[in-house]
Amino acid sequence: MQLERRAPRRRTPIGLTPLIDVVFILLLFFLLASHFESWRVLPVDANQTAPAETEDAQRPSLSVRLQANGCVDLGDAVLGPDAFVERLRDDFRQRPELRVLIRPDAEVDLQTLVSLMDRILAVGVTEVSLE
């Protein structure tokens, strides 16, 4: 009895073309399905001219100095960010036309400054300036 011997199977290589197609389809899906959030922008107008002296004298303003550690100097008092916001909220309730002037120290990083400005704007103050 003689058995037939089959020829060994040759393995066919897996083509990369279908794999690349699937990757591109997934890429397109995630690009189209993702949500591109528009980032908040703080308006800064460097060309703004200084207001008239009479206007400055009539408008109440609160001048603060921002330290590198996030604390705020308000007159002789050194306040943490939360305490400053609470005090600002009380002042703003009494004087809704209040504006805030911020003098940041040289060591203050941008994130600390922007965080403070965000908190001031959240209170309702509409005019925040840097000195």
Image: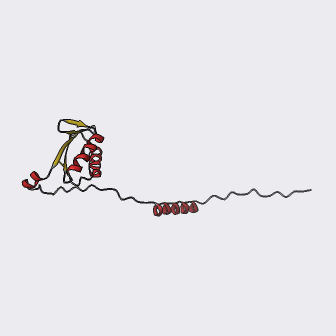
x and y, in percent, of residue 83 in the image: 28, 40
Residue sitting at 73 percent across and 57 percent down?
Answer: 9
x and y, in percent, of residue 45 in the image: 19, 57
Quarter location, residue 73: top left
**Foreground residue, 114 or 119?**
119
x and y, in percent, of residue 91 in the image: 22, 47
| Residue farthest toward the left in the current orientation of the protein | 54
**Foreground residue, 7 or 123?**
123
How many numbered marks, from 0 up? 0
Q: Is residue 117 above or below residue 17?
A: above
| Residue farthest toward the front in the current orientation of the protein | 94
> Which colour style is shown?
secondary structure
**Foreground residue, 5 or 16?**
16
Q: Is residue 64 above or below residue 97?
A: above
Quarter location, residue 69: top left
Q: Could you tell me which quadrant the N terminus lies in?
A: bottom right
Q: Is residue 99 left or right of residue 81?
A: left
Residue sitting at 48 percent across and 62 percent down?
Answer: 33
Tell me if residue 131 can be seen. Answer: no
Q: Is residue 86 left or right of residue 95?
A: right
Residue sitting at 43 percent across and 60 percent down?
Answer: 35
x and y, in percent, of residue 66 in the image: 22, 41
Q: Is residue 117 left or right of residue 20?
A: left
Tell me if residue 8 can be seen. Answer: yes
